[in-house]
Amino acid sequence: MKPVVLAERVAEDFVRIFRHRAKWSSLDAAERAVGALEAECLVLTPRCGMPWSSVRRKRLRDGYLVFFTEMPDALLVVAVFHEREDWTALLVRRLAKPDPA
């Protein structure tokens, strides 16, 4: 099984999700939600989810979507968005300007 690596910008996604959840519920609920999402990301497999553009998309808990790509030695998570966000536009921009190497 290939290891899962989170791109740098995924940390920003988790911060955004945390802030949203904390605003609308509680800090404890936000911590649990982000922790659960991160745990789900770390057990991805190359064939889970569905192809979308140059990446694969998998639905996670509470309507969140994870986008990842298979590299030679790992799975790279490139984004986590909520399905109610304009994730198509956000992802196109994210893929056009990948994390710096």
Image (cartoon, rainbow, N blue to C red):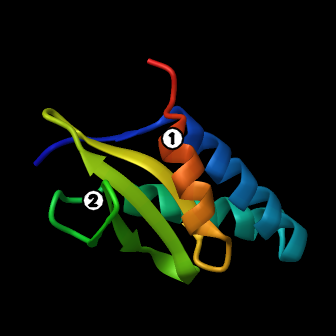
Residue denoted by label 2: 44
Q: Position of residue 79 (x, y in %)?
A: 50, 52
Residue 92 in the image, given as x and y percentages of width and height = 53, 54
Q: Quadrant of the C terminus?
A: top left
Give the residue at the far top of this rendering. 101
What's the distance in space between the residues labelled 1 and 2, CA to CA? 23 Å
Please name the amino acid that badge 2 sits on: Leu
Where is 101 relative to 49, above or below?
above
Residue topped by disc 1: 96
Few, some or many residues within 10 Å of mark 1 (<14, 14–19, 20+): few
* Residue shown at 62% from the left, 65% from the top: 32
Q: Earlier in the sequence, mark 1 or mark 2?
A: 2
Q: Residue at x 13, y 34 (%)?
A: 72
In the rendered image, residue 64, in percent from the top left (x then y), is placed at 54, 73
**Which residue occupies the foreground of this view, 92 or 12?**
92
Q: Which of the pair 100/12 is nearer the observer? A: 100
